[in-house]
Amino acid sequence: MLKIVVCVSGGGTNLQAIIDRISDGTIKNTRIVGVISNNKNAYALERAKQNEIPNRCISPKEYATRDEFNEALLQGVKDYRPDLVVLAGFLVNIPAAMIQEYRGRIINIHPSLIPSFCGVGYYGLKVHEAALKKGVKVTGATVHYVDEGIDTGAIIFQKAVNVEPGDTPEILQKRVMEQAEWIILPQAIHKIAMEKE
């Protein structure tokens, strides 16, 4: 059984996709053992509660220094004893100590086809704003392993999504979620779970 911790910052739509795919059997041999958010108001925490998944907020605002927060985050993850850490819209730079502790066992979903529109400053709507500004006809999402860089780890899956005339960043974001993120993130977890068997 692959035990996963899901780290989130906002609404938790990717978390919901994982919950739903475990529930319907698309993701096999996997259990969510914990959900961690850096934002106490994240709706993702409510989704966890509704599904009786252990959850907690570890916010940088509660710590005097970034180092103290990083230590608390790493300990918070360790407390759940996961096999895999899933970053699902987690807007926090992962501390080096956590990358070392879980090398090859942290994955992230990014809302573009890496290497396009990724790295420092590219997150959330900013990614879709940049794609529309550039005038690309195809965008998408990428699931990748996390290393010391930002969006630089080995790619597991990518899925392309067409940009349509009249798209706003919000419309494009929703389409990328529905047509790519919510599909390939569960696929990646299932793949890792099957390899663990």
Image (cartoon, grey):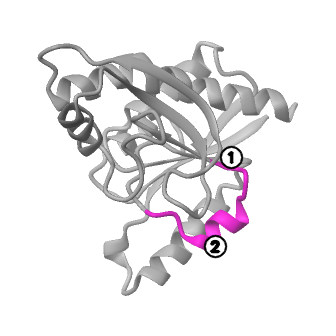
Q: 48 or 166: nearer the eye?
A: 166
Using residue 23 as the reference point, say whether residue 194 is left or right of it.
right
Characterize the local packing of mark 2: few (<14), some (14-19) or many (20 or more) Cα atoms within 10 angstroms. Answer: few
The residue that appears at 38% across and 18% down in the rendered structure is 161
Give whichever of discs 1 and 2 has the lower sequence position.
Answer: 1
- Three-letter amino acid code at the position of disc 1: Leu
Q: 52 or 152: nearer the eye?
A: 152
Q: How many marks?
A: 2
Task: Point out the stretch of residues depicted in magenta.
Answer: 93-106
Q: Quadrant of the N terminus?
A: top right
Secondary structure type for disc 1? strand
- Three-letter amino acid code at the position of disc 2: Ala
Q: CA distance from mark 1 to mark 2?
A: 15 Å
The tag on residue 74 is none
Instruction: Evaluate if marks 1 and 2 touch, with contact meaning CB atoms under 8 Å apart.
Output: no
The residue that appears at 29% across and 41% down in the rendered structure is 127
The residue that appears at 20% across and 38% down in the rendered structure is 129
Q: Quadrant of the C terminus?
A: top right
Q: Which residue is mark 1?
A: 84
Q: Which residue is mark 2?
A: 97
Q: In the rendered view, would you say 20 is above or below 68?
A: above
Asked whether the viewer can see residue 19, the reply is no
The residue that appears at 48% across and 82% down in the rendered structure is 68
